[in-house]
Image: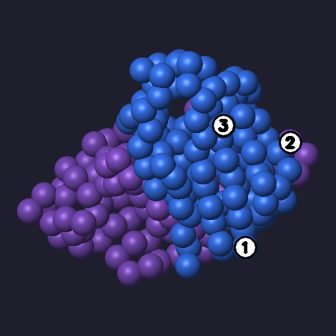
Amino acid sequence: DTEVTQTPKHLVMGMTNKKSLKCEQHMGHRAMYWYKQKAKKPPELMFVYSYEKLSINESVPSRFSPECPNSSLLNLHLHALQPEDSALYLCASSRQVPDPYEQYFGPGTRLTVT
Amino acid sequence: RKEVEQDPGPFNVPEGATVAFNCTYSNSASQSFFWYRQDCRKEPKLLMSVYSSGNEDGRFTAQLNRASQYISLLIRDSKLSDSATYLCVVTANSGGSNYKLTFGKGTLLTVNP
């Protein structure tokens, strides 16, 4: 089963709201990722977790706060976002880091900031 | 030179055609190579890993030339369902024990009846 699930599918939030995106995988993968994708652009890496520890932060603004409660779950906490943060947020997982194994993506959360 | 560069497209081909996508990468230390496909408003899905010896999966053939830093994807007997954006993806060490996927901008393929 190569499934990564994400909730919610769609989210509309105001600039003063606090919300969280959730991601789950049951493939035993020990690396999990958050990406941001704008329309007609490739995904951009935001964060990498390896064995539940943050290993890469691609200079993401602090209004995005990742959390990895256990090896199957990955959250992205959102606070005081800007309209330009509206995008598709993708979660992915892979067997491990290092070792550049294939990544499997979830369906994404389509976020609109108003 | 961009890290990963793909044919800009779009490609419009009739059903049954053979279509080839090309991709070049700038980091000679890159270690793994993949083709993903992405349907409109969906997530990227892994299509194939790409190996130096070349690999084939049904109608799809991927090739890697490390000396030229070049990757290709060939689709034979294209189907309407092949219509998607094809993303060339390269993995390289980004410092210490960290690896990072770098995506090309993608090439849009439309297969017409």
Chain at tag 3: A
Give the image location of residue A43, x and y in percent: 53, 41
* Callout in the foreground (2, 1): 1
User: Where on the picture, by quarter, is residue A101?
Assistant: bottom right
- Disc 3 designates what residue? A77
- Mark 3 or mark 1, earlier in chain: 1
- Disc 1 designates what residue? A28
CA gap, disc 3 and disc 2: 26 Å
The amino acid marked with disc number 3 is: His
Residue ranking furthest to the front = A17
Q: As displayed, is residue A80 above or below residue A73?
A: above
CA gap, disc 2 and disc 1: 25 Å
Q: Mark 3: few, some, or many residues within 10 Å (few <14, many ≥20)?
A: some
The amino acid marked with disc number 1 is: Gly
- Number of the label disc, if any, that sits on residue B95: 2
Position of A21 with respect to A87 (left or right) is: right
